[in-house]
Image (spheres, grey):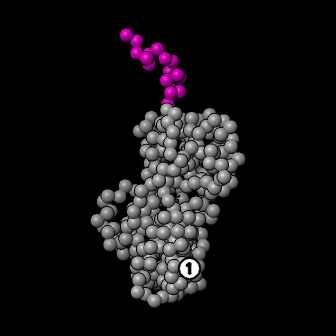
Amino acid sequence: SATLSSLLPATALAQKKPVLGFAQVGAESEWRTANTESIKSAAAEAGIELKFSDAQQKQENQIKAIRSYIAQKVDVIAFSPVVESGWDTVLLEAKAAKIPVVLTDRSVNTKDDSLYVTFMGSDFVEEGRKAGRWLVEKEKGNPGPINIVELQGTVGSAPAIDRKKGFEEIIKADPKFKIIRSQTGDFTRAKGKEVMEAFLKAEGKKINVLFAHNDDMAIGAIQAIEEAGMKPAQDIIIISIDAVKGAFEAMMAGKLNVSVECSPLLGPQLMAAVADIKAGKPLPKRILTKEGIFPMEVAKAEFPNRKY
Ligand code: AHR
């Protein structure tokens, strides 16, 4: 007897694969590379056709990509907004075209939450708090002052805004903690190094702590600290966020004190959401990633378990 596939024209069968248009932030960090890899492999595994674009950390490129997905009439659009604001116009266009939008990793700042179906990813404010709590505990008994320099993520991005907020919320309880310099390193190693060099030039030995909004910037800063003849993690306490393999290597080498986990492995969850949307199932407005914190003392034991 004839099978369904022999009766259907090939094009009809090909059309059955859901099509997902994904507008990625860029390839700025080890985290982002792992995130892209997770999305690509999960799409292949789930039988979802993926249209992928890299915005090179520029909002205008992401907007262009989203518009092209709308023109191509994809089934679902997903993206990690490079910055928080300025999305309403393009999201209204997607809504008018009846294409559901999923936010992954980073959220948008909008008054109209009908513009997206769900937001899946980390609680960045809580990550900042975890970093702050670790420092408060570490410096218990030290009368201070404790001078902190901060390497912020991309200006206007949710993780930069929220991590700063969470960290400050915790340290402000004790006036001995002072952020003496704070500048963006755009989430990259190169910028992290460059800005740390400037911090060291301006403040030198006054710096007690570095809080970097991601591991890549911390790794860049470690180089700058070593080149300045100082010992990272000893002369300057270093706290960062992501817990990528590069951070574990730095911790095992005794050069980074702690990394707060932020998981990039959102691919399987995203593909499950696409399948649910296609099946007409409702989704929660917020899908939260569970995460931990890894001080250097546990790095060696934890390293074999790390997936990114
Ligand atoms: O949005 C998540 C952040 O973006 C990660 O912490 C950082 O490494 C990445 O570039």
Q: Is 225 or 209 nearer to us in this picture?
A: 209
Q: Position of residue 93 (x, y in %)?
A: 69, 41
> Is residue 224 in sight in this rendering?
no
Q: Is 276 or 301 nearer to us in this picture?
A: 276
Image quadrant occupied by the N terminus: top left
Residue 16 magenta-drawn? yes
Q: Which secondary structure, mark 1? A: strand
Q: Amino acid at mark 1?
A: Ile
Query: Relative to 79, is 212 above or below?
Result: below
Find the magenta span and give its range.
1-18
Instruction: Please indicate whether residue 140 sits to the left or right of residue 12 in the image.
Output: left
Q: Position of residue 141 (x, y in %)?
A: 40, 86
At a point 63% along the width and 35% down the height, the residue shown is 98
Instruction: Please indicate whether residue 218 sits to the left or right of residue 90 in the image.
Output: left
Q: Find residue 65 and report its image quarter.
A: top right
Image quadrant occupied by the C terminus: bottom left
Q: Position of residue 106 (x, y in %)?
A: 55, 55
Query: Relative to 276, is 29 above or below?
Result: below
Residue 9 magenta-drawn? yes
At a point 52% along the width and 33% down the height, the residue shown is 280
